[in-house]
Amino acid sequence: MRSDNVKKGIHKAAHRSLLYATGVSKEGLKRPFIGIASSFSDLVPGHAGMRDLERQIEKGIHTGGGQAFIFGTPAVCDGIAMGHCGMKYSLPSRDLIADCIETVAEAHQLDGLVLLTNCDKITPGMLIAALRLDIPCIVVTAGPMMDGCSKNEVLTMIRGSFEAVGKLSAGKITQQRLHEMEEECCPSAGSCQGLYTANTMACLTEVMGMSLPFCATASAVSSKKKQIAFESGIKIVELVEKGIKPSDIITKDSMRNAIVTDLALGGSTNSILHLLAIANSGNIDITLKDFDELSYKIPQIIKLDPSALPTMTDLHNAGGIPGVMKTLFGNTPELKDTKGVSGLKISQIVQAAWVDNTIVHTLDNPITSNPGLGILKGNLAQDGAVIKISGVDPSALTFEGTAKVFNSEEETMEAIDKDRIKEGDVVVICYEGPKGGPGMREMLSPTSAICGMGLDKDVALITDGRFSGATRGAAIGHVSPEAVSGGTIAYVQDGDIISIDIPNYSINLEISDEELEIRKKNTKLLKKENITGYLKRYASMVSSADKGAIINK
């Protein structure tokens, strides 16, 4: 065992003394050392209920014959960090989390890990760490929160808060109604109810095989989640005994399975960033080309909040991810029969699966023949841009409008608040990319405000930043190269015509090559001053979005 390096032999007497000080018994020293990397935080609703799950995992590890050790990792709530400087730290926290787990696991020579996670950057950060360490690991995602309800109106975090602010601005609801909705839209611990980034990544983690069946969709406050946590504790000891590592589970085939499922789900655009970063950590050959290739082949068969009314609760009751796999497997040749930490192949999981086709449509009756996600290219995004096609109204799939250019999210929100955004505008937000932000902030506040004002069919938004998984409308992010690196987005001017053709995966600035070259010669790129601390280090090392916004090795 790896842990023999800190507990076996005469020269480890001091190590054993320190372990005894933590409460470990002589019998415990003989067992595999299993770390529970927990992102519990009172600050984050997705993580506030993890104390019970920590105990369940701990019981499972002991039952399976292991010695459990709990340690913490950072966790950022994107909803709370949204719309101010705090969002600059959200994406960078992904790499910080991976570094923290690597540090603790290596320093204490742990034999295996249970990765207890839930929200947007925490899950991919833990998966990056799992592949980097390549010791036996299993993931427990803490699960979605209950649906909200006020005056018989079913609410989610987006409908009940972010979009409600836009409705108030447009005079569609009263301030009193806003307060009623904000108090009831998030009624329990758990990740936000829709197919936003947290739940998308939970689903893809299960598809890749790193968590047990139904882990992604079982509610955070359910007994089912506690059972899964306990069983995951037992299972990690078995994985250690058999020497099954993340690199045995997360392969090119299983990652392409995740992409296939992501497209079928219409998941968060952030999943593309995260899957690319995970692939990089494991030296797995996955690039934007895989997303581009598969996007032409996989129809969308599920539509959940924020693009529709059903939530993760509805998906769970409709058969969960096993039900989705049952629908895709055997009918989608791109989906391979990979094996996960459960010890079961997809072909075995789907045998016992049930699916409700009112929520999970069949392939011959899809929500749309368009994929859930798309990669756009053109002179405005030579290395690619990402759009959540599932969140776009069919009337806006092709869009030509007039550019209104802003150099930050704050400038954009000021324009929205002053009613300067009108039908036919293409809002362009520059210098919010991985390097330029730095940190590649989510633009949920402007997109939600635009939707709440009823302009989601009539206004497009383009940025080198990114969007929340809760975003809907013609919102195009991850524009690469980004502005600070001299991408075309830096040279867009107010009044320019921008053409967006989602069915043909194109995005173009309608100016001549000659005019673009003139602008490049005459435009001074904006460099943000006074960047310090972690963000300064991050900006100096991070790659472009089309590479996953990874810390370069």
Image: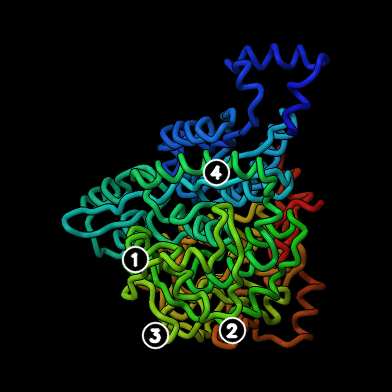
- Give the structural element (helix, strand or loop) at label 1: loop
Tell me: residue 111, above or below residue 309: above
What label sits on residue 235 in the rendered view?
4
Residue 124 x/y as whole percent: 61, 52
> Where, by quadrant of the figure, is residue 160 drawn?
bottom left
The residue type indicated by label 1 comes to Ala
Count residues near mark 1 (Cα–Cα under 10 Å), then give few for <14, some for 14-19, many for 20+: some
- Residue bearing mark 3: 365
- Give the CA distance from mark 3 to mark 2: 17 Å
- Give the CA distance from mark 4 to mark 1: 26 Å
Disc on the earlier residue, 3 or 1: 1
Residue contact at pointers 2 and 1, CB within 8 angstroms? no
The residue type indicated by label 2 comes to Tyr
Disc on the earlier residue, 3 or 4: 4
Whether residue 321 sits left or right of residue 30 in the image: it is left
- Residue bearing mark 2: 296
The residue type indicated by label 4 comes to Lys
Disc on the earlier residue, 3 or 2: 2
Q: Nearer the viewer, residue 41 or 322?
A: 322
The residue type indicated by label 3 comes to Asn
Residue contact at pointers 3 and 4, CB within 8 angstroms? no
Q: Nearer the viewer, mark 3 or mark 2?
A: 3
The colour style of the image is rainbow
Tell me: residue 155, above or below residue 419: above
Q: Nearer the viewer, mark 2 or mark 1?
A: 1
Residue 150 x/y as whole percent: 20, 53
- Give the CA distance from mark 2 to mark 1: 26 Å
- Give the structural element (helix, strand or loop) at label 4: helix
Q: Residue at 67%, 47% (x, y): give it.
A: 130
